[in-house]
Image: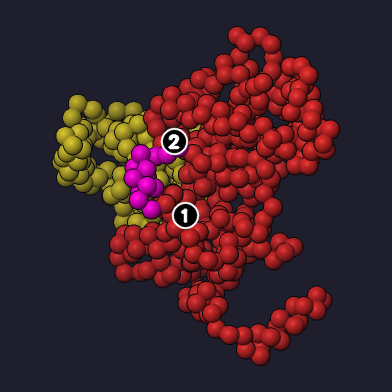
Chain colours: A yellow, B red
Amino acid sequence: MSDGPTAGDELVFMMGKFAAKFPTDRRYAKNHMWAKREGSVVWFGFSAYAVRLLQDVYFLEWSVDAPTRLREKQTIGNIESSKAESELYAPAAGTLTEFNMLLMKDPTPINVDLYGAGRLFAMECDDTGMLTPEQYQDHLAAAWKIAEKTIKGQMNE
Amino acid sequence: MPRKLTVVISQGQSANPAKRKLEEDVVAGLLFERGVEVTVVPNLYDLTPDGTGMLCLQGISGDMVVVSWLFSRAAFWTLDRNGIRGREGKVELVNEAEEDEDEDSDGDEAAAADDKPRVLASRDVPNRVIYCLDFKARNLAQPFIEEILRIKKLAEAQPVNILMNWIGGSPTPAQQVRFDAPTNTTSGVDAAGKLDGSSPAGAGPGIHLGLSNEAPADATPAAPTIIAEESNRRWYPVIDYARCTNCMECIDFCLFGVYGVDKVDTILVEQPDNCRKGCPACSRVCPENAIIFPQHKTPAIAGSPEGAAGAFKIDLSKLFGAPDALEQAVLERDVELVDAGRAAVGMAVGIPKRQTEKAAAPKDDLDKLMDSLDDLDL
C-alpha cells in the first residue's frame, strides 16, 4: 500500500498467521469488498481478506459495460488468480458508472495497492447500509470458519 | 523440399504464468523446425478487423495452424469472419475430457447428418487447410509440437494443394510443370515469393512475414514474428457456417443491429461492436447452436465441440432453474434493452418461429407471389 493507513487507522483480522488489515476510513460489503464514498459515487475494491484468499491476480474480466444498472448480487464479471477462480457479484444495487480500466491490462495493483490503485469500480448507490469496519470484523469471524473448511476440503480432494 | 507451414500463437488474456509459459514453450519448441514459421499475436478474438494483427494473419497463405485459448470452432470461425478462410483441418489433439464424447457422437457430424442445407455448402472455400488447436487441451508444450509436426507432414504430402494456394488456385500448365519438377532447390523460394506478391491482402506495412524460412543454415532458428497490437477486450458473436442454415432467427431476435446480410442474403455479423457485453441471448435462440460467443463461461456457447443443438439448453435449464433457453434469452435481451434506455419487449418481438418445421408445407398463393417478386430481380 503506497498510501495505506498508519496503525490505529485500521483493524486487523488474523487469517491463521496472516494479519489482514482493514482501514477504518471506509465501509465494507459482505462479499468482501471495501466501499469508499468519493463525491456522488462509491468506489469498491477487494478487502485484504479477499485478496489474501485470491493471492496473485492474473486476470479480471467484467461481463457488463459501464454505465449500467445493477441488482444486488448480479453477476458482473469473473476473476482468475493463483489460488482461485471466481465469479464477481454486485455488492449493492445501483448504477455502476465506471470500471478501473487500468486493471484490464495489468491487474497487479489489486495485490500491491488494494485500498488505493487496486480499486475496481465506482457505483452510484446507497452505502449507509454497508458494514462498518467493526461489523465487518464480526462478519469475518463467521466467514473465516467456512473459508477454512472450504480451503481444507478442496485440498483434501 | 520443405514447405512453409505457418503456426500462429494467439496469446491468452490472462497473466497466469503457467499459461504464458505454455505459449512460450510451444514457440521455443518450433524455432528449430525447418519450414515452420511462427507468428505470435494477442488474443485472436480481441483483434480489430483493421489492426496490425489481423492484417498480418490475412497476409499468410498456405496451410496454417492456429493455437489459441479459444475452442477450435471459435478460433476457426473468428478467422473466417475476418476473411481468413480455408478448409477446417482435422485436429487429433483435443481436450481429453471431450475426446470420449467425440468418439461417441461427433456433434458436427450429427448436426450435418440431416438434410438441412448449411451455409458452408454453398460457399467457395480456398483450397488450403486451417487447423485450430486449443491450448486448453494439454498442460505441456510437447503434445502441441508433436501435433504441429504431424500436420506439417500432412501438408507436405499434398503438394498440389499447396501449389494451388501459392498461385491463387488456378495454376497454368507451365506453372504446374515447374512445380512438379523443380530444377533446383531455389524454386521453392521462387514459389514462396510468388505467394507473397499474389496475396491480395498482403502483409501490413512494416510486418516481416519471414517468408525466407528456407534459409540454408539449419542451426539458425527463425525468429518468430511477434505482433504487439494494443487490444481491448471485445464481445461479439461468431457464426459457425458449417452449422448455420441461414434461418434468420438471430437477426429477428437481436434488437441491437448486430446482424445483417451480405450481397447474396447470407446472414453475417455486420456490426459486431453493437453487441451488448456479456449478452449471449442470440446464441440461445439459434436452432442449430451455430452462434458462438468465444469468451462466454458456458462451454457450449463458447464453441465447445459437443454440439447437438439441444445439449447445452438442457444443461442451462438445470443451471438456471425455471427459465428455459428461450426465456433466458428473452430475459437477457430485456436487461440489455432497459440498460440501453429502451423498453423491454419480452416475448413480443423476434421469437423463433422454428421455420424449419414449416418448410414441408406446400407453397400457398402468397408464397408463390413472393417467389415471383423475387424472380423479378428488382
Judge depth for marks 1 and 2 and give the one in front: 1
Q: Quadrant of the C terminus of chain B?
A: bottom right
Q: Where is residue A42 in the image (x, y as percent from the top left)?
A: 43, 50
Disc nearer the start of the sequence (1/2): 2
Main secondary structure found in the magenta portion: helix
Q: Is any atom of residue B97 visible in this view?
A: yes
What residue is pinned by disc 2? B93
**Looking at this view, is B91 or A11 the one in front?**
B91
> Is label 2 in a helix, a strand or a loop?
loop
> Is label 1 in a helix, a strand or a loop?
helix
Q: Distance between the Cα atoms at labels 1 and 2?
A: 18 Å
The local crowd at label 1, few if under 14, some if 14 to 19, many if 20 or more residues have their Cα within 10 Å, is few
What residue is pinned by disc 1? B109
**Looking at this view, is B9 or A126 the one in front?**
B9
The local crowd at label 2, few if under 14, some if 14 to 19, many if 20 or more residues have their Cα within 10 Å, is some
Span shown in magenta: B92-105
